[in-house]
Image: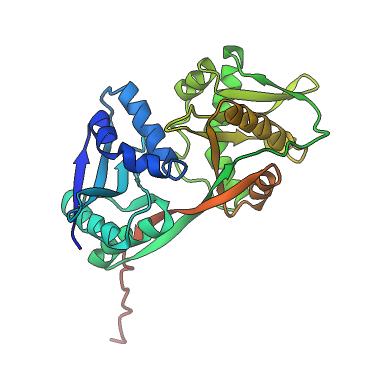
Amino acid sequence: MAYRVERTTDPAAFLALAEDHLAGEPVLSTVVSTTLERAVADPSPVDHPRWWAALVDERTDEVVGVAMRTAPFRPYPLYLLPMPTAAAEAFGAWLLAHEPDVAHANGLRASVEAALGVLADDRGGSTRVLEHDRLWEATSVLPPTGVPGSARAATLDDLDLVTAWCLDFMPAADRQAGRPPREGEGEHLDRDYARGKIERGFMWLWEDKGEVVHLTGWNPPALGVARVGPVYTPVEHRGHGYAAALVAQVTERILSDGARACLFTDVDNPVSNGVYERIGYRPVAEMVRMEVAPQPVAVTTPGPA
């Protein structure tokens, strides 16, 4: 069975090519469809790799898998959706020829393992899981009771606080999962990101006794699916139910608007997994962030002279 790779830097052209495939499993496709729609709306040049690729079954001319490289932070990892193992391996072979600097990928675990496995075999190394994530969907909500405080939309008066919390979101998630924060992680969730979320009404805060204690953001629906995140509570305010309460309210808002609601969690963070399950989220797929680790250099010890 043969597969070809159709790659483009034109988001509108790729959406036309792959939209039906993405719409077939829109929750699984949420990251790709959100990124695509954002790029179609603003196709301005960027200073990092940005392209999309479709894996096409040459017998049927059908798109059977999708990948992209659009992350605005180093090491500019790939993002892969579900595809047949043979298609993922064909994509790995294509990467060797066309994107030789690739060594990191996120996405559906089976696809990432198969594609990066080809790179590892070629380079004499191995693959290594850096983070194990899970995708969840809620079709109904069980809001917690008795949580002190209330929700409100963030305003530009909150911009400094929201920016600081967005920048700490990913490093804090690493610390909570027992990993050291990675250099530069989360730096793309900057002031411009926070301002855009606030101005469009996609950033909400929880206040308790006049103090802001938690934030929850979300993305506008793409192909009918809205993704919740970031979800951030400072260490000193954890354990009071603020995250559960605001994520539940945001999720209810998404569902009442007729969209589907999803979010990602870090499997190594049992606290957040438990919170979302209690308010109605159910697991959909296992995700992974993985790298190709180079083969260790053999060190020889000189014998006696």
**Quadrant of the rendering where the C terminus is positioned:** bottom left
Above or below: residue 177 compared with residue 213? below
**Quadrant of the rendering where the N terminus is positioned:** bottom left
Considering every residue shown, the one lying at the far right of the view is: 146
Considering every residue shown, the one lying at the far bottom of the view is: 304
Q: Nearer the viewer, residue 231 or 182?
A: 231
**Number of callouts in the render?**
0
Q: Nearer the viewer, residue 104 or 87?
A: 87
Q: Is residue 296 visible?
A: yes
Above or below: residue 286 compared with residue 147? below
Considering every residue shown, the one lying at the far top of the view is: 157
Above or below: residue 73 compared with residue 84? above
Residue 162 is situated, as x and y percent measured from the top left of the image, at 58, 24
Residue 261 is situated, as x and y percent measured from the top left of the image, at 55, 36
Q: Is residue 49 visible?
A: no
Q: Quadrant of residue 51?
A: top left
Residue 111 is situated, as x and y percent measured from the top left of the image, at 36, 57
* Residue in the image at 41% along x and 55% along y: 290
The image's colour scheme reads: rainbow
Residue 136 is situated, as x and y percent measured from the top left of the image, at 56, 46
* Residue in the image at 60% along x and 12% along y: 157
